[in-house]
Image: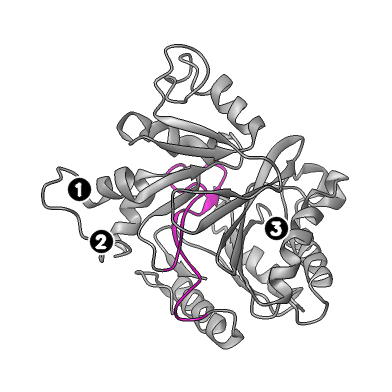
């Protein structure tokens, strides 16, 4: 039950440790959980490696894509890592393996918000993509329709908006806190609005049987945003955490703790992420309620500074304050993870 791939040095060690700790924690079992493929792990300016994760219940064939900042470069990286080695591409298709995954194995998109680092891959790949549903809150669908798929920035591959409507992506508006079925058998999604510095973002809670995981779009902390939106998500997850059905979280920490709260622009940093996880711990029953819980820390801002290591710095700061026993992991593009 270890993550597989071709991770090197620290990333390899972190991935292996991650898998072992899930096994020891008792949260994971051999016959359930979620498979995750990291198509894009970063935030900010590193085009070609921006937020995008494939998720499926373990044992299912097809995935949903949670955000799509990067698609084809991420699929190529995952293919080089051997993530799709067990996929049997039909002999009568003209698709490469990466093409087959894009066209047939990604069953739907779930978009947290319409910022470019979360949708650029979706937009760029759209002319060669296959028809599929796109799940999002109504505000996100409006933004995609009005500002991207509008024939000024890009042809309208959506199902509403400026004519001609090409309809490749069928918009499926989600009602907050109301579960919705997806094209992947047994997989449901429930959307919760987040406050991304005044922009409505989304947390997607994915469930398959008793198993639950959550994928968070960009979000500020409740204390900074003067909001209770993250608390609403934690309350929704508390029961699953208490009963050890919460398999893992994918959540951002865009900056390290040197970033002032006033210039976070609706993002998290280690101090605030720890604060929020302590809220979940309290709601789930207190001390040790989150012990062994895997937390993939995504959307770390890429740095152009010499010798910068934002991932390492953020991970160290998280570990320094980790009195909950959660397992923090920095995902890398092309990595395959089992929750």
Determine whether label 2 and label 3 are within 8 Å by CB.
no
Secondary-structure class at tag 1: loop
Residue closer to the observer: 289 or 256: 289
Residue that mark 1 sits on: 96
x, y (%) of residue 269?
Answer: 73, 56
Q: Is residue 146 magenta?
A: no
Residue closer to the observer: 137 or 226: 137
Please tell me how crowded label 2 is: few (under 14), some (14-19), or many (20+) other residues with Cα within 10 Å: few
User: Measuring 58% from the left and 20% from the top, which residue is drawn there?
Assistant: 146
User: Measuring 61% from the left and 85% from the top, which residue is drawn there?
Assistant: 25
User: Nearer the N terminus, badge 1 or badge 3?
Assistant: 1
x, y (%) of residue 161?
Answer: 53, 17
For the residues labelled 2 and 3, the Cα–Cα distance comes to: 39 Å
Of circles 1 and 2, the one toward us is: 2
User: Measuring 51% from the left and 57% from the top, which residue is drawn there?
Assistant: 187
Residue that mark 3 sits on: 256
Q: Is residue 303 visible?
A: no
Looking at the image, residue 114 sits to the left or right of residue 193; the answer is left
Secondary-structure class at tag 3: loop
User: Nearer the N terminus, badge 2 or badge 3?
Assistant: 2
Secondary-structure class at tag 2: loop
- Image position of 205 with respect to 11: above or below: above
User: Measuring 76% from the left and 56% from the top, which residue is drawn there?
Assistant: 258
For the residues labelled 1 and 3, the Cα–Cα distance comes to: 40 Å
Span shown in magenta: 29-58
Q: How is the image coloured?
A: one colour
x, y (%) of residue 271?
Answer: 78, 62
Please tell me how crowded label 3 is: few (under 14), some (14-19), or many (20+) other residues with Cα within 10 Å: many
Residue that mark 2 sits on: 87
Q: Is residue 159 visible?
A: yes
């Amino acid at each position: 039950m270890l993550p597989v791939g071709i991770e090197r040095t620290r990333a390899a060690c972190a991935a292996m440790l991650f898998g072992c700790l899930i096994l020891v924690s008792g949260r994971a079992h051999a016959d359930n959980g979620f498979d995750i493929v990291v198509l894009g792990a970063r935030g900010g300016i590193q085009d070609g490696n921006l937020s995008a994760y494939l998720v499926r219940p373990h044992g299912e064939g097809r995935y949903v894509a949670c955000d799509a900042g990067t698609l084809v470069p991420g699929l190529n990286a995952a293919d080089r890592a051997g993530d799709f080695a067990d996929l049997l591409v039909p002999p009568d298709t003209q698709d490469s393996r990466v093409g087959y995954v894009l066209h047939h194995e990604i069953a739907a998109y779930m978009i947290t918000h319409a910022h470019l680092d979360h949708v650029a891959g979706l937009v760029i790949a759209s002319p060669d993509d296959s028809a599929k549903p796109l799940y999002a809150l109504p505000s996100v669908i409006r933004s995609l329709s009005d500002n991207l798929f509008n024939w000024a920035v890009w042809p309208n591959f959506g199902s509403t908006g400026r004519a001609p409507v090409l309809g490749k992506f069928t918009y499926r508006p989600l009602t907050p806190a109301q579960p919705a079925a997806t094209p992947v058998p047994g997989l449901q999604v429930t959307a919760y609005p987040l406050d991304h510095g005044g922009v409505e973002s989304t947390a997607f809670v994915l469930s398959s049987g008793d198993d639950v995981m959550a994928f968070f779009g960009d979000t500020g902390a409740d204390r900074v945003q003067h909001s209770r939106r993250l608390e609403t998500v934690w309350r929704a997850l508390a029961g699953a955490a208490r009963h050890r059905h919460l398999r893992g979280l994918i959540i951002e920490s865009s900056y390290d703790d040197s970033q002032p709260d006033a210039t976070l622009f609706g993002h998290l940093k280690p101090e605030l992420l720890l604060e929020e996880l302590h809220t979940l711990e309290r709601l789930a029953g207190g001390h040790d309620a989150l012990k062994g819980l895997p937390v993939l820390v995504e959307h770390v801002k890429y740095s152009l500074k010499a010798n910068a290591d934002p991932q390492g710095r953020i991970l160290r700061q998280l570990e320094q304050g980790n009195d909950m026993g959660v397992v923090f992991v920095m995902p890398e593009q092309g990595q395959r993870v089992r929750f």
